[in-house]
Image: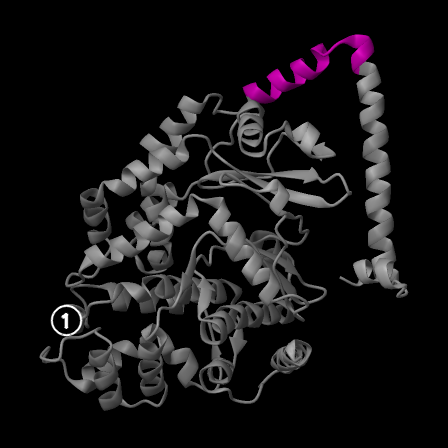
Amino acid sequence: MLGALGVGAGVALSDADRRVRLERQARVWRLSTRRSIAWGVTKVRGSRATEERRAELEQQFAIRTAEDVAQVLGGMKGAIMKAGQMVSFIADGLPPEAQAALATLQADVPPMAPSLAEGVIRSELGGDPQKLFLDWDPVPVAAASIGQVHKAVMPDGRLVAVKVQYPGVDKAIRSDLDNAEFLYGLFASFALKNMDVKPMVDELRARMGDELDYRLEALCQKEFADRYRDHPFIHVPDVIHERSSRRVITSDWVDGLNWRDFLEAATPEQKHTAAEVLFRFAEGSIWHHRVFNGDPHPGNYRFHPESGKVTFLDFGLVKRWAPGELEGLSPILDAILAQDPEGTLKAVVHSGFLPPDSGVSAERLYEYCTLPYIPFQREEFTYSSEFVGHTLQRMLDLAGEYSDVIRQLNMPPSYVILDRVVWGMSALFGRMGVTHRWGDLLDEYLHAAPPSTELGRAEVEWRRRRLAAAQP
């Protein structure tokens, strides 16, 4: 933003902006020179070397034809793989055998060959990637559930990430999604005994279908990028719309530590800051904007320990609250945090989680419902993987100490994605082993309490500037 203003209005560039501009200009010069030289060499030697390199890359990858893509990603996994990701938030509370099965469903898929990725780019964007981008790396930097990511350079020198959907995977997954009875049975094996899986599966079927259209993801990502622009510790990359379509999405490239490297390299203080950023991003989106990213997968973050910022990626699974949905949740949380059994029972029944004639006592229901909110009822709490796993086991054990409560509970479908975020975040906090005054943080978003940390104060000041700038 400052760089653009400096060019148009004569504003002096900062040292950081000047470095970014010089780096981009140098990148364009180097790549343009390299391409000119490569073109000259090709004219002399012919294109055999390029074809040999392409053949070498093709042979490196397990998937070499569109039929193989559809078979491996559709016939073998398809929606089953997506279902495994959807329910992965309960993995810490499942027996080892079930955890192993979920891990298999979520295993990395082999990348597609360069020719297939180039074919998708060509059909979606109308040109070869070598013409659309100043530089294009045919080897993907990541291979995910329905697409893979390539690093590229725009003609103006910007580094970008290009996510390309596997050809045929949309048809394969939609075929599975159309088989509703199959999915009902699949989710029933993970659901609570008395849970009506049909509305839950229907909710997830709709969300899974949305993930297949990158145009929807691009709109959601743009919405989040605009919403958190210039935020002190939250960053969402901008989408390059002229290089995006139904099966391709291009956005600004972001360096940073992935989850595994961050866990290994970060200090306890840096993990503490990162956990608070993750929490504030989720809760701020839910309570301030009534929309949130429903995929807390650790691969969707890039950490910047020196600045304390976190970059958020992948907006294919976004949940928007319908009128009344969020209003039905807050009374439950208020009663639980106030340690009010009677109020908890009344709110849970009113929200449709429990029939009014269930026979479950207020004390018994409160004892069960309060389990995941223990960290918010204490002045300070340290998350651990043991706490998360043990709590989930107690809440999911159909033959355990709370079987009488579980048999009566039924989760409305609107809260399925939220539950995934809550437990996904808890699992991440447990692996980081972070200590915080979680109740104070939540109070800021539930009841507009004064900020309790430096990050909270920075966010309030950022919000104040945004509001002031929006005034006529």
Viewer-side residue, 5 vs 329: 5
Against 2, residue 238 (above or below) is above
User: Which secondary structure type mostly characterizes the magenta part of the structure?
Assistant: helix
| Disc 1 target residue | 408
- The secondary element bearing badge 1 is classed as loop
420 relative to 452 in the view: left or right: left
Q: Which colour assignment does the render follow?
A: one colour
The location of residue 242, given as percent across then percent down, is: 63, 43
Q: Is residue 56 magenta?
A: yes
The location of residue 289, given as percent across then percent down, is: 49, 72
The location of residue 367, given as percent across then percent down, is: 25, 81
Image quarter hosting the C terminus: bottom right
* Residue name at image x 24 percent, y 67 percent: 411
* Residue name at image x 34 percent, y 59 percent: 90
36 relative to 67 in the view: left or right: right
Residue 175 in sight here: yes
* Residue name at image x 84 percent, y 17 percent: 40
Image quarter hosting the N terminus: bottom right
The location of residue 424, given as percent across then percent down, is: 42, 62
146 relative to 264 in the view: left or right: left
Residue 77 in sight here: no
User: In this picture, which residue range is highlighted in magenta?
Assistant: 42-59
Which residue type carries mark 1?
Gln
- Which class describes the residues within 10 Å of circle 1: few (<14), some (14-19), or many (20+)? some
Against 413, residue 471 (above or below) is below
Q: Is residue 212 magenta?
A: no
Viewer-side residue, 394 vs 183: 183
Against 446, residue 397 (above or below) is above
Tally of numbered discs: 1
* Residue name at image x 47 percent, y 33 percent: 166
